[in-house]
Amino acid sequence: MSSPNEQRTALDAVDSQLLAALKRDSRTSIRGLAREVGMSAGAISERLERLEARGIIRGYTIDVDPAALGFGMEVLVGIQTNQHRGLNETVADLMTVAEVAQVQLVTGRWDLVVRLQLRDHEHLREVLLGEIWQMPDFQHSESMIVLQSFQPRGLISTLRTSP
């Protein structure tokens, strides 16, 4: 017997194909998707609406290369906080820093892991000393410069389809 979560996220082969196609290019038209999976545009439109209503498709995004904009250095910063104010306030403060690309609440040694997009080492120094270390509940951090990132094919390609 499957759990409610498994039932809620089960996809058939067509839905999996649609998600994979949209992951490759979220600008693909409904007609293009219909051609790719061999169905009518109307049927594809209904399926997309259903995937959106179920919360499986949360939106359609653009993928901007930060390096092409001069922000080629990616840094992960593990942060320990004093937790006097609460993490929501600290996260809100971090989200106002222009160089912050993502904030994650994590378990383990760090309370938060922050992903920064920066120009260079001097820019990292400016953001750490001038912004992150000045936050009210900042206690300690560790910075890790990303040397290379690897992307898996993605969850969509590994999803099981329903029988």
Image: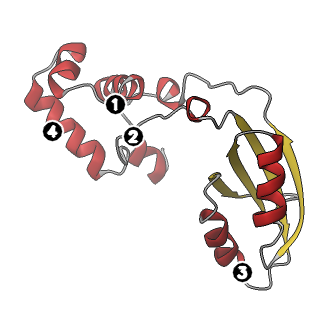
Residue type indicated by callout 2: Thr
Instruction: Measure the alpha-carbon separation of dots 1 and 2.
Output: 7 Å
Residue sitting nearer the eye, 20 or 121: 121
Which residue lies under the disc numbered 2?
Answer: 61
Q: Position of residue 55 (x, y in %)?
A: 36, 51
Please name the residue that numbered disc 3 is placed on. Answer: 86
Tag 1: amino acid: Ser
Q: Nearer the viewer, mark 4 or mark 3?
A: 3
- Give whichever of discs 4 and 2 has the lower sequence position: 4
Q: Residue at x 77, y 39 (%)?
A: 120
Q: Residue at x 29, y 24 (%)?
A: 14
Residue receiving disc 1: 26
Instruction: Quickly name the residue at label 4.
Output: 46
Colour setup of the view = secondary structure
Residue in the image at 58% along x and 36% along y: 66
- Separation (CA) of disc 4 from disc 2: 20 Å
| Residue 157 seen by the camera | yes
Image position of 122 (left or right of 51): right
Of pointers 4 and 1, the one earlier in the residue sequence: 1
Task: Decide: is 2 above or below 17.
Answer: below
Q: Whole-percent x and y of residue 35?
A: 18, 14
Spatial CA span between label 3 and label 2: 31 Å
